Image (cartoon, grey):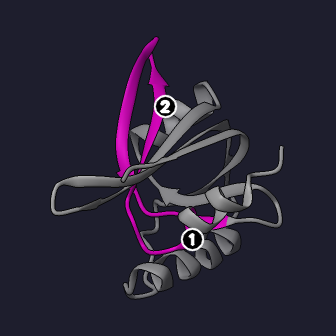
Amino acid sequence: MTVPAEVERLLTSEPLMAHLATCREGRPHVAPVWYVYDGRADRVELVTTGRKLANVRANPRVALSVQKDEGGHARWMVSLLGTAEVVDDEAATREATRRINAKYGASEDAWSENRLVRVSVGTASSRTYD
């Protein structure tokens, strides 16, 4: 799937929080995450730990939601459905951490238990609000 240019523009426009939805024992589990979007591969990268990793390993189907608000009013939203993969490679995790933290203005430090998660986008939708 190719992510539409407008969706890619929104995803890369500024450092906003995404919400990652995974499945835990047949129930949704949603958590905020920092991310970067890689338009060349139509995928999202994030680094995380704990429950989210266990959920992705058990069921790789995920959803990501990103929304831009101003003064409590939604300006736009993007919803992505895809398949996630935990990448157990320390060098790849460090590199992804560097890219993600640079986007959000954070130090390049990474928690040792973090792992890279790559989400291959299957479908993308967006909506802007006037």
In space, the residues marked 1 and 2 are separated at their CA atoms by 22 Å
Between 89 and 20, the one nearer to me in the picture = 20
Q: Is residue 76 left or right of residue 80?
A: left
Between 15 and 100, the one nearer to me in the picture = 15
Residue at the spot 74% in from the left edge and 52% down from the top edge: 3
Tell me where residue 22 appears, x and y as whole percent: 49, 31
| Secondary element type, mark 1 | helix
Foreground disc of the pair 1, 2 = 1
Tell me where residue 8 appears, x and y as whole percent: 65, 62
Q: From what the image shows, is residue 68 above or below residue 23?
A: below
In the image, the segment drawn in magenta is 11-37
Extreme top residue here?
Answer: 26
Q: Which mark is on residue 12?
A: 1
Residue at the spot 45% in from the left edge and 75% down from the top edge: 14
Q: Which residue is mark 2?
A: 22
Q: Quadrant of residue 121?
A: top right
Query: Which class describes the residues within 10 Å of circle 2: few (<14), some (14-19), or many (20+)?
Result: many
| Secondary element type, mark 2 | strand
Residue at the spot 38% in from the left edge and 29% down from the top edge: 29
